Image: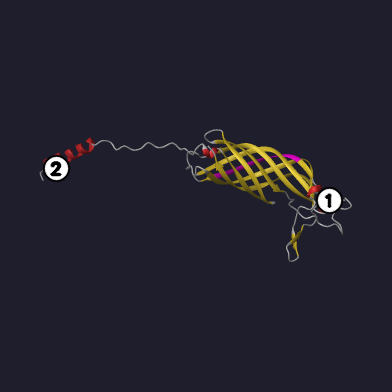
């Protein structure tokens, strides 16, 4: 083929391509789930050094990356010096020097701030959280303290977990949470997440979990704190 003919054919082909109408692409639909991930209610399962706990939470969207949160949880409290032993074939347990059971119920309100929103896809939403509020505690006797000296002596039987619950007393305190976590998935109806935080509570009067002779140190304490891992299941709302 003559070179000039080839050039003419090439130019005609190029002109035909240019003359074709531009391909129409659909516009990107807005993220209809964005608001939902900041508003919802759900439950949490909590794990700390004292055992398991349960909670309920409500999140309200305050901004594009900010949510307010109110959370109520219930869990047991133990002294780090407690040691539980199994007795017999039926799994009975005894904790030497234990004086009282204790349950904590903190009610906290705070803020969740999503981080790295522009760098990470919406199916992984890390955040930091700060919250604070009152803590209600309830302690009740571990054994039947017949003579009232705070020591378990011969003939004073164990109450069992619920045996002496009617003989307890309430304790009032305050606490806070500092945590980092993340929610997963892009469902429009629900989401799940995990959170690692430090949760602390301080009571305005002594909490006595151990017998007076359990240690040379005071068996009473007012501060409870430690790391808590929690798993969240949240129902998303409009």
**In this rendering, which labeled residue sits more in front, label 2 or label 1?**
1
Q: Which residue is mark 1?
A: 212
95 left or right, relative to 46:
right
Horizontal and vertical percent position of residue 159: 80, 55
What secondary structure is found at the residue carrying circle 2? helix
190 left or right, relative to 79:
left
Horizontal and vertical percent position of residue 133: 68, 37
**Nearer to the camera, 207 or 171:** 171
What secondary structure is found at the residue carrying circle 1? helix
199 left or right, relative to 101:
left
* Cα–Cα gap, marks 2 and 1: 104 Å
Horizontal and vertical percent position of residue 97: 80, 55
Question: Which circle marks residue 6 in the picture?
Answer: 2
The residue carrying pointer 1 sits among few (fewer than 14), some (14 to 19) or many (20 or more) residues within 10 Å by Cα, namely: some
The residue carrying pointer 2 sits among few (fewer than 14), some (14 to 19) or many (20 or more) residues within 10 Å by Cα, namely: few
- Is 179 magenta? The answer is yes
Q: Magenta segment, which residues?
A: 172-182
Residue at point 14%, 39% (across, down): 8
52 left or right, relative to 125:
right
Q: Residue furthest right?
A: 147
- Identify the image quadrant of residue 14: top left
Horizontal and vertical percent position of residue 180: 59, 43
**Up/down of 84 relative to 105, above or below:** below
Of mark 2 and mark 1, the one earlier in the sequence is 2
């Amino acid at each position: 083929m003559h070179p000039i003919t080839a050039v003419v054919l090439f130019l005609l082909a190029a002109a035909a391509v240019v003359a074709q109408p531009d391909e129409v692409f659909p516009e990107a639909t807005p993220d209809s789930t964005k608001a939902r991930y900041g508003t919802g209610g759900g439950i949490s399962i909590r794990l700390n050094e004292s055992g398991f706990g349960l909670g309920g939470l409500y999140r309200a969207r305050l901004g594009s990356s900010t949510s307010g949160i109110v959370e109520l949880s219930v869990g047991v409290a133990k002294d780090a010096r407690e040691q539980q032993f199994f007795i017999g074939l039926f799994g009975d347990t005894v904790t030497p020097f234990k004086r009282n059971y204790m349950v904590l119920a903190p009610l906290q309100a705070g803020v969740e701030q999503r981080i790295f929103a522009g760098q990470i896809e919406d199916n992984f939403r890390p955040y930091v959280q700060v919250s604070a509020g009152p803590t209600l505690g309830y302690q009740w006797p571990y054994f039947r303290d017949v003579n009232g000296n705070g020591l378990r002596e011969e003939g004073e039987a164990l109450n069992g977990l619920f045996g002496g619950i009617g003989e307890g007393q309430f304790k009032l305190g305050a606490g806070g949470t500092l945590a980092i976590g993340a929610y997963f998935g892009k469902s429009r109806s629900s989401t799940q997440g995990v959170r690692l935080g430090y949760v602390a509570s301080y009571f305005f009067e002594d909490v006595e979990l151990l017998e007076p002779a359990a240690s040379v140190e005071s068996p009473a304490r007012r501060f409870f704190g430690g790391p808590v891992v929690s798993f969240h299941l949240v129902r998303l709302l409009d």
